Amino acid sequence: MESSRNENGIGEKELLVVSFGTSYYECRRLTIGAVEETLEKEFPEYAVRRGFTSRRIIERLNKRDGLLIDDTERALKRAEENGVRRLIIQPTHLMHGLEYQKLAEQTKAHMAAFEEIALGEPLLASERDFQAVIEAVTEELAPYDDGKTAVCLMGHGTEDQANQVYEKIQEKLRKAGFHHYYIGTVEAEPGVEDVAKAVKAGNYTRVVLAPFMLVAGDHANNDMAGDEEDSWKSVFFREGYQVLCLLKGLGELEKIRLLFAEHAREAMKSLE
């Protein structure tokens, strides 16, 4: 059984963890759920609650599994109705993209309802964050550093200018000596064809595909590791590479979870 973390009786201090969401149970448990548990352990004086931003996922989980998860607006209303005085909102978003911007607007709209309210930063907000994330990812994928394998990270992508995050990650990977790492996106640039072109310029026999996303959900299972002609796996297979797909979201990495905790701690300190 899974808790939707929308219980009442919250108390005066709440830590609301806001995620896009995923309908994949095991993935949700190992990523979003793990982040929430880490924050609960780090901040035992706060009641940790959950909010999803995707109405489609919320509705699917409710209809399919009978699990009702609050959307962000309902989660904020619940905190208000429960008399929460200090509210910390920690998103699990990767960047200051459109999802984060909408959350910031919602936070601002509810400021008058609480004595104290603060919004934490997304995963990649500072130079230190970039370094920490690159360290976490490359440590996790170190077993594939054999000189013959290209590691390709699949991000989501956004139409917002925040999409520059992927270019920045690529640049920092190169500067750190990880020339066999390549990053692309599902819904923006660079796309899989750009990544494949870059990989072909190297001398590789194998390609490892891994999601550069909090969860290894629908995009990872279908757009990356699916059998459709346009999936990343199919694209690299047609190019003659051995292809290995790793279905492990960033939220499964302890260093990533602790980085979210650090951002929540910074949000708390901003109120002091």
Image (spheres, helix red, strand yellow):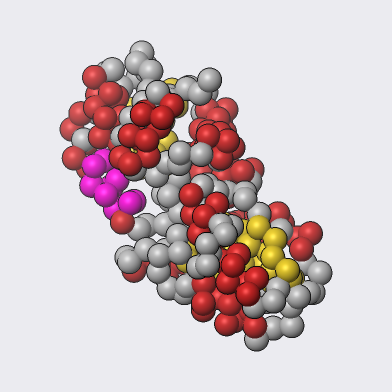
Magenta includes 138? Answer: no
* Quarter of the figure with residue 117: top left
Whether residue 261 is visible? no
Residue 264, relative to residue 46: is it above or below? below
Whether residue 200 is visible? yes
Is 27 placed left or right of 87 in the picture?
right
The x, y position of residue 118, in whole percent, is 33, 39
User: What residue occupies the far bottom of the structure in this picture?
Assistant: 201
Is 174 placed left or right of 103 in the picture?
right
Q: Residue at x 42, y 36 (%)?
A: 17
Residue 167, relative to residue 25: is it above or below? below
Is 148 placed left or right of 182 in the picture?
right
Q: Residue at x 81, y 69 (%)?
A: 146
Nearer to the camera, 241 or 117: 241
Q: Residue at x 40, y 65 (%)?
A: 187
User: What residue occupies the far right of the structure in this picture?
Assistant: 146
The x, y position of residue 76, in whole percent, is 27, 31
Is 239 placed left or right of 77 in the picture?
right
Q: Which residues are magenta?
A: 99-107
